[in-house]
Image (tube, rainbow, N blue to C red):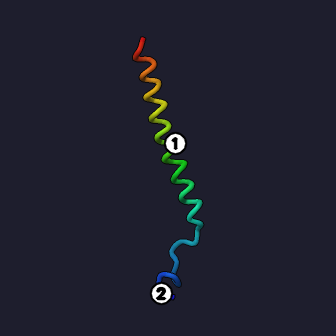
Amino acid sequence: MNQFEREVQSKRNDAIDSGVAFVVSFGFFATLFIIATIVDIFSGF
């Protein structure tokens, strides 16, 4: 075993971190899409 396998910085599960990152990025782009849709609807009047 090398040094990095013995001294792990974080013992958290990587799947949880990637899931949180996916949800946050999805929420950001969904918010942008919703705002753009609202602007598009109200710009037609």
Marks 1 and 2 close (CB-CB < 8 Å): no
Residue drawn at x 59%, y 60% is 16
Element at badge 2? loop
In x, y percent, where is residue 28?
47, 42
- Vertical order, 24 against 9 (above or below): above
Query: Dividing the image into 4 quarters, which one contains the C terminus?
Result: top left
- Vertical order, 4 against 33 (above or below): below
**Residue 27's mark?**
1
Residue drawn at x 45%, y 19% is 41
| Crowd rating for badge 1 (residues with CA inside 10 Å; few <14, some 14–19, many 20+) | few
Sequence-earlier tag: 1 or 2: 2
Residue drawn at x 50%, y 37% is 30
Residue lying furthest top in this view?
45
Q: How many numbered discs sit on the rendered protein? A: 2
In x, y percent, where is residue 34?
49, 31
Q: Quadrant of residue 32?
A: top left
Q: Amino acid at mark 2?
A: Asn
The residue singled out by tag 2 in the image is: 2
Element at badge 1? helix
**Residue 7's mark?**
none
